[in-house]
Amino acid sequence: MLELEQAHLMPMPVLFDGYVEKPARVSSACLVSVASNRYSVPCEWVGQMVSTRLYPNRVAVVAEHAVVASHERLSERGQDCYDWQHYVPLLERKPGAPRNGAPFADLPEPLQRLRRALLREHGGDRFMAQVLAIVPSAGLDAVLVAVALAVESSSLSGRVSVEHVNNVLGRLNAPPVPEKVETPLKATTPPLADTARYDSLRVQDSPLELDHA
């Protein structure tokens, strides 16, 4: 019966996108106020007007006809909701922010381990800021894998560095090694580790070269 009736059924309508929209200005702390709570916005929108959309279970921030931030809606009042990636561009000017900054309290566990390892060293704030600055270009998933591998290997060397993380990222993003191609062709002159062959070639090309040497 379903097969017979399917051709006469009405298409499923699109879900109603219901929300309450209000304008808001982004504060100097990269936050907008929505329903007695504050939500973070990418730092490049500081001081500008954006549009906030309040859904039953989430909050979206729209600027220039695009969603620039999205958060789960907070159930209590007077709370702040951060996305630490919104603050990454600020680390160039404030590399010490990941140490005690509220937006960086909820870093993923691999980055938390890296922060604990780096901040024990001189210049650790700057190193941590450099690692976080890689995220926008390399992607969060790739950086988390690279950081986890770098921290694991540092347990043997005793130190982890930004260069180590970049090296791991380079290996992860390296193109695959081409497969070995089988061929019936064979070299007529087998390769031999004979440095004297070089001198014989020089004599053939220029007899005076060997005398000069």
Image (cartoon, rainbow, N blue to C red):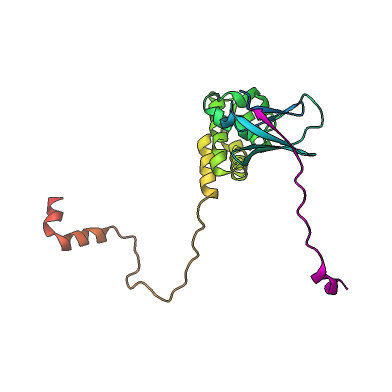
Question: Which residues are drawn in magenta?
Answer: 1-25
Camera-side residue: 190 or 132? 132
Toward the right, the furthest residue is 1
Q: How many marks?
A: 0
Camera-side residue: 151 or 42? 42
Q: Is residue 114 visible?
A: no
Q: Residue at x 58, y 43 (%)?
A: 139
Camera-side residue: 36 or 131? 36
Camera-side residue: 131 or 29? 29
Examine the rendered structure and indicate whether residue 136 appears above or below residue 38. Answer: below
Q: Quadrant of the rendered structure where residue 202 is?
A: bottom left
Q: Residue at x 77, y 43 (%)?
A: 18
Q: Quadrant of the rendered structure where residue 77 is?
A: top right
Q: Position of residue 84 (x, y in %)?
A: 64, 32
Q: Position of residue 33 (x, y in %)?
A: 71, 27
Q: Is residue 25 visible?
A: yes
Examine the rendered structure and indicate whether residue 61 appears above or below residue 145. Answer: above
Toward the bottom, the furthest residue is 184
Q: Position of residue 117 (x, y in %)?
A: 61, 30
Residue 23 shown in magenta:
yes
